Each structure stands twice: as structure tokens, then as C-alpha cells.
Image: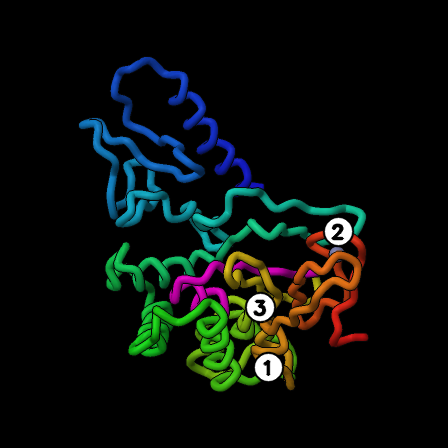
């Protein structure tokens, strides 16, 4: 709830600024869904921490909500709040919703050159080193599919699921990348961190018992789970193309989707893979 209040307060400031007179105010402005910090000299703050303690990147956009004492931060992709559904007793995330752990966001900010590496904790510095070694020689010109597959394979090649009793370390990126083991939260955090680092939009999905990821491939959110044994990136990211028998429209199915409404006529059509 603390996070939610803070978010609202940021939104509140921007609303006040929008109706303020023409005087140059120092404070937050919202343009096209992004937040910028207008400084007293009229320029937008760049690559720094604002006077009220928030981080803006090299592109002048607010990077993440700063929150003391750990927990989650919202990321620039996260323009929708997530909510608790009392009926299902779980948190609901829509496809546009995204959040991240504070320490993971610090690592990402350092990878992007927004904050100095010296700002990282000792553990985060080690994670940073692992992320940089993964990125060394990475083909940023690859397709979203190939990028997501590379991230998936990097994680599944170097870490195995920890079958023993839960330990705090199981939830940490450090454990996945350095110790080579962890549980679903650690896997999901690592996937998001590496995916974001190579420029993919990725978020968390969870149902209270398990956590996995969403990843955007060519604008479509797909489900991917690096902690499940015996699967492959293609299983999650693959696409089946089929012509609608009713109207002839081409439809693309996710590998795991059995049926969906036709893009052309709306009639429910089967994924040929499951026919
Ligand atoms: Zn159709």
C-alpha cells in the first residue's frame, strides 16, 4: 500500500502542474505516459537523482519509483496499478503491468549507465558482473524471439531448480546466476532482468504459489517459465499459423493456446496443433 500511495502522490503532483500558471516550476510533468522532472532553470533533469529522490535516465524519463527498505519498484513500463482480487485471492497483473525488485532495478540502471556501478551493493555488483558477461557480444539486432530464446537458454543452462526446502537465497538473482540454483521467484527475477537488459519488455506473473514471466515478442505478450524442467524456449515462444475455415483470415496461435476467436470473423477456431 505504501507503494500505491507514493504512486498516487506522484500522479497528483503532475496534475497540479498541468493546471499551474506559466511560471517555471520545478517538479514532475507527464508527457505521453512518461514522467519528466522540470528543473528551476526550465530544462528537464537528465541522468540523475531528482531533488525529491527519484531517478531519471539518459532519455530524461523517470526510471523507477524509489522505495526505501527493499520490496518492489514500478518500472517505466508499469503505467497500470496491479490489484488484489479477493475472489481469487491473488494479485492480478494485466499485460501492461510491470514491476521489479529494487536491487534488480539498481543492477539494470547500472548496466544502462544510469547510476555508477559503485552505487551497487556488494551482492548486486556480482550480479552486475554476471549480467555484463552475458551481454558481452550479445546480438542486439536479433529478433525479439531470438533474444528471448537466448535469455531463456542462458538461465536454464546455468541454473537448476532447488528441490530442497525453501531458503531466502532461492528468491535471489544472485543465487540463479552465481550459485546456479533457486526457486521460481529467483528464476523469474533473473529472466526479467536479463530480458530487460537486452531491450525486451518483460513482467512477472504469479498465482500465489508460483511465479513466471510475460515477455513481449513483436508486440504480443507471451508466457515463459524458466523454472519448469523439461521444456524449451520454443515451447513458450513458438507460433502456429492457421487459415480460418470460416472466413480465410490468417490466425497465429501461441504454442500453448488451444483455441481462440478468429481475428477476422470472431468465430472460435482451434489451434491445428491440438486438432
Ligand atoms: Zn474467421
Point out the residue furthest to the front here: 248
Foreground disc of the pair 1, 3: 1
Please tell me the numbered disc located at residue 185. 3
Rendered image coloring scheme? rainbow
Please, what secondary structure does the residue beneath circle 1 have? Answer: loop
Please provide percent x and percent y for residue 212.
61, 67
Residue visible at 46% across and 81% down in the picture: 154
Please say if 275 is above or below 270: below
Sequence-earlier tag: 3 or 2:
3
> x, y (%) of residue 51?
28, 36
Labels 3 & 2 near each other (Cβ < 8 A)? no
The structure residue drawn at horizontal position 34% and vertical position 75%, both measured from the top left corner, is 138
Q: Secondary structure at mark 2?
A: loop
Q: Which residue lies under the disc numbered 1?
A: 232
Question: Residue 214 in the image: x percent, y percent?
Answer: 58, 62
Which stretch did the figure color magenta? 191-207
Separation of marks 1 and 3 at Cα, in angstroms:
19 Å
Distance from the alpha carbon under mark 3 to that under mark 2: 40 Å
Residue 137 position by quadrant: bottom left
Q: Earlier in the sequence, mark 2 or mark 1?
A: 1
Q: Is mark 1 within 8 Å of ligand 1?
A: no
* Residue 265 image label: 2
* In front of the other: 95 or 227: 95
> Along the horizontal axis of the image, is 69 left or right of 133?
right
Q: Is mark 2 within 8 Å of ligand 1?
A: yes
| Residue at (67, 51) in percent of width and height | 92
- Which is in the foreground here, disc 3 or disc 2? 2
Q: Identify the secondary structure beneath mark 3.
A: helix
Residue 29's place in the image compared with 172, above or below, is: above
Residue 193 is a magenta residue: yes
In the picture provided, is 254 more to the left or to the right than 63?
Answer: right
Indicate which quadrant contains ligand 1: bottom right
Amino acid at each position: 500500500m505504501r507503494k500505491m500511495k507514493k504512486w498516487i502522490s506522484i500522479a497528483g503532483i503532475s496534475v497540479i502542474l498541468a493546471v499551474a500558471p506559466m511560471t517555471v516550476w520545478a517538479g514532475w510533468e507527464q508527457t505521453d505516459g512518461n514522467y519528466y522532472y522540470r528543473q528551476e532553470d526550465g530544462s528537464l533533469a537528465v541522468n540523475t537523482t531528482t531533488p525529491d529522490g527519484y531517478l531519471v535516465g539518459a532519455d530524461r524519463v523517470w526510471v523507477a519509483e524509489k522505495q526505501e527498505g527493499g520490496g518492489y519498484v514500478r518500472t517505466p513500463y508499469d503505467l497500470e496499478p496491479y490489484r488484489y482480487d479477493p475472489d481469487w485471492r491473488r494479485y492480478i497483473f494485466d499485460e501492461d503491468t510491470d514491476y521489479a525488485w529494487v536491487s534488480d532495478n539498481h543492477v539494470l540502471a547500472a548496466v544502462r549507465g544510469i547510476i555508477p556501478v559503485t552505487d551497487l551493493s556488494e551482492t548486486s555488483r556480482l550480479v552486475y558482473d554476471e549480467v555484463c558477461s552475458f551481454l558481452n557480444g550479445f546480438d542486439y539486432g536479433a529478433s525479439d524471439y531470438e533474444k528471448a530464446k537466448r535469455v531463456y537458454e542462458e538461465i536454464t543452462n546455468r541454473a537448476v531448480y532447488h528441490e530442497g526446502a525453501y531458503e531466502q537465497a532461492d528468491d535471489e538473482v544472485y543465487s540463479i546466476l552465481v550459485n546456479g540454483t533457486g526457486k521460481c521467484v529467483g528464476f523469474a527475477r533473473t529472466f526479467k532482468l536479463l530480458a530487460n537488459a537486452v531491450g525486451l519488455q518483460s513482467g512477472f506473473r504469479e498465482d500465489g504459489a508460483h511465479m513466471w514471466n510475460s515477455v513481449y515478442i513483436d508486440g504480443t505478450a507471451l508466457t515463459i517459465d524458466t523454472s519448469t524442467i523439461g521444456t524449451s524456449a520454443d515451447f513458450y515462444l513458438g507460433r502456429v499459423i492457421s487459415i480460418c475455415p470460416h472466413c480465410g483470415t490468417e490466425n497465429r496461435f501461441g504454442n500453448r493456446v488451444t483455441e481462440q476467436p478468429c481475428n477476422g470473423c470472431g468465430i472460435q477456431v482451434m489451434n491445428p496443433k491440438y486438432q
